[in-house]
Amino acid sequence: MRQALGSQLRITPDVENVFVCLICFKFFSESDPDEISLEHVPPDSVGGKVRTITCKVCNSESGSKLDNHLALKLEHEDIFAERSSGPLQAHASIDGIRLPIDFYKEDNNFSIVIPNNDKWQQKCRSQIDAFTEKVVSGKFEINVEYKLHSSKRANAAILRSAYLWAFSVFGYGVLINPHFPVIRGQIHNPEENILSSQGYGFLSGGIPDELLGVNLIKSPREARSLLVVLDVTSELGTKTRYGVMLPGPSLPGPMIYDWLESHQEEPINYQLEHIPEFDFLDAPMAFQMLWNELTATN
């Protein structure tokens, strides 16, 4: 970190080779290699690749609290858009008899199948027989329950990915931003409405390949921000592209989300500048320089 920011950084106590986790902001020294992990951006479960490092605790917590919900969201979208017939693991209940099932959807038809597991079927034979008898009678009401994803947690996983991607391009210099604590707050508290827009500034609708990565939104003025464009991929292979807005260090700051929320129904002509990847150790304050050039143009 000292190498990345040089004279911009003061560390107390004065130690060399310090790593600061950009999620929790805890300090780790070179004597703590087991506390640091490679970070896939987006998450590995949705097709991401290693782009940076975080501490192991933050990486693990993201997997259980956020990333799983994003992967489940993509799975549900595939099934209910009939790109996949399933199965979706679920439970079915008839008159209090509850069994795990595989749930399929195809051509507006639904079907449930009892898992083909001999050991489990032998153990639950009486329940299976009673369940089957109810179905054969033709007089039954069936309830199907499947594990729901949290849209807020799935969105927070995408927001976190954009934040990590921006760091992987600009390094610690991008964190010198008075508005990024709000972003980290939303990542740490996904169920709270810290940011005004539940979409966190997500843009969609044919974002071209050449904008993958980090961009500056130069206009309209009310939307000036970083735009991180990334792809997530379902287990089936369906690719979904997101453009995620992150506030710059000066105005409009987090107000970009209010502005976008109020203009969702309008076509917006964005002027963008793509930022090619570079070695941020050679230009640790590149983000501030780019932002100052942008805001100096009125």
Image: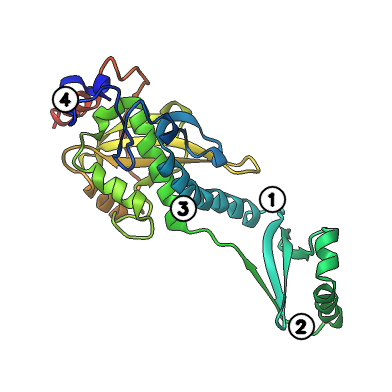
Residues at circles 2 and 1 in contact by the CB criterion of under 8 Å: no
Disc 1 marks a residue whose amino acid type is Ser
According to the picture, the residue beneath numbered tag 1 turns out to be: 84
Q: Earlier in the sequence, mark 2 or mark 1?
A: 1
Residue matched to label 3: 65
Where in the figure is residue 211, as x and y percent of width and height?
41, 29
Q: Would you call the spot at circle 1 few (<14 residues within 10 Å), some (14-19), or many (20 or more)?
A: some
Please, which colouring scheme is shown?
A: rainbow
Q: Are marks 2 and 4 in contact (CB under 8 Å)?
A: no
Point 46% across, 53% down: residue: 65
Q: Nearer the viewer, mark 2 or mark 1?
A: 2
Which of label 2 and label 4 is nearer to you? 4
Dot 2, crowdedness within 10 Å: few (<14), some or many (≥20)?
some
**Image coordinates for residue 87, horizontal then vertical, percent:** 72, 55
Q: Secondary structure at mark 4?
A: helix
Label 3 Cα crowd, 10 Å radius (few <14 / some 14-19 / many 20+): some
What residue is pinned by disc 4?
8
